[in-house]
Image: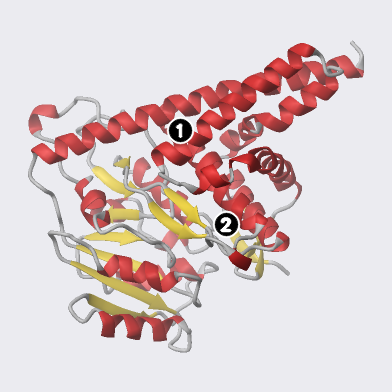
Amino acid sequence: MGIATAVEAVTTLLTVGGLVYMLLALWGARDFEHSWRRTVRAGARGEEFAPDVSILKPLKGVDARMYAGFVSHCAQQYAGRFEILFGVSSMDDPAAAQIEHLRAEFPACAIRLIVCPERLGTSGKVSNLIQMLRQASYDYVLINDSDIRVSPNYLTRVMGCFQPQPAKLAGDPGSDGAPAAAPVGMVTVPYLGRTAAEGHGLTLWARLEALGISTDFLPGVLTARKIEGGIRFGLGSTLAVERKALAAAGGLEPLVDYLADDYEIGVRIARAGYRIELCGETVETTVPAYDFRGFWDHQLRWARSTRDSRRWGYVGLGITYCIPWAVLNCVASGFALWSFTLLSLVLLARVSVALTVGVGVLRDEQVLRDLWLLPLRDCFGLVFWAWSFASHTVVWRGERFTLENGRIARAA
């Protein structure tokens, strides 16, 4: 077998593998939507579950549209009590002034600014969360990033997922395929990346980042959920936990040196015997006006974090970038007619996943705007996947770290 024939065979297998993955992603998205509809209908027939909850938001600096996210948390239509704790390392942090403004705008909302002077590990975020948790008032805790923007029904829908199953349903399959008898220990939610609508903030790199979240990242989550019979990790967009589940998982202290703390919290709660629910509520995160360097650093940090968190699953992630594999297959086959047929099927499947997940599940209209960028997005995705194996260095908020087995240390 010549080199050209071998390359043709390999790219054909990789392309077909990517096509199969796209079909699995469509299956996973369909299953998630049906499961969430059943959950909503069951909740509508039962008593509303609205436990008191403490929202923890660690802060560092001021991000674009961050204040609008704060306002959305204060405007919750929630039957239970809730408080919002913001954590800063020092009162010199510019975010502190925004919290004072927020308290003046929403005097009826329980808002507290917590100064977290201790640095307990490499991750300043987790260090702050540990100190904030000590001052939280309620048995349920919800953690999300500083720039997350939510709907008025966010708390109702997220916390409603903790509602205990009726005794008569014990042993029946849960919404994520786990036994209903397993209590819910964590609820997490999907998210979309919101770019600037126009102007200088709407860079090509910001558009590629947002497109990847809606059409690449979430399809992977939904596929894992379907294949593995549920999810066993968390998404940083929302980590809602019951304190006793968090304590059973070892608390936050062991995570002070982890980069993907959201993933690790979910893994440990699942190992402790609790179920993790993926709620159908969608939240927004802000995508900065990235230049190429910023886009490159963020994508590599994301890729290397995933590489260390889900090693074998990450190795298989390479086949999911089916468009570049199909294009390479056309070249390797000498532009044979059958290779163009395969490319056409891949394009159809890829667009179907983008529309089903990005538009259907997330309601992200930006996907329609940037659909034509899918081939470029997949090409970059394949490059990041391959390059992520070349080094253990990541850049996080302008600082360089080395990453090994999920743990970070300051680079020399």
Q: Position of residue 160 (x, y in %)?
A: 20, 48
**Viewer-side label of 1, 2:** 1
Q: Label 1: state its secondary structure.
A: helix
Q: Does dot 2 land on a helix, a strand or a loop?
A: strand
Say which quadrant the N terminus sits in.
top right
In the image, taking residue 221 as reference, residue 162 lies left or right, namely: left
Residue at (15% x, 41% y) in the render: 164
Q: Is residue 256 visible?
A: yes
- Mark 1 touching mark 2, by CB under 8 A? no
Is residue 139 positioned above or below 209 on the image? below
Residue 268 location (% of width, % of height): 39, 47
Inspect the image, locate mark 2, and give the three-letter code of the amino acid beneath it: Arg
* 1 or 2: tag closer to the N-terminus: 1
Question: For the residue marked with disc 1, what is the amino acid?
Answer: Thr
**What residue sits right under mark 1 in the picture?**
356
Counting from the top left corner in percent of width and height, residue 139 is at 20, 61
Using the image, tell me which numbered label, if any, was put on residue 407.
2
Residue drawn at the location 27% of the way across and 55% of the way down: 154
Categorize mark 1 by other alpha carbons within 10 Å: few (<14), some (14-19), many (20+). Answer: some
> Which numbered tag is attached to residue 196?
none
Q: Residue at x 19, y 65 (%)?
A: 138
Q: Position of residue 293 (x, y in %)?
A: 72, 62
The quadrant where residue 19 appears: top right
Q: How is the image coloured?
A: secondary structure
Q: Who's the residue at 11% across and 48% down the image?
A: 48
Tell me if residue 185 comes above or below residue 351 in the rendering.
below
Q: For this view, does 266 lie left or right of residue 124? A: left
Q: Quadrant of residue 113?
A: bottom left
Badge 2, how many Cα within 10 Å: few under 14, some, many 20+?
many
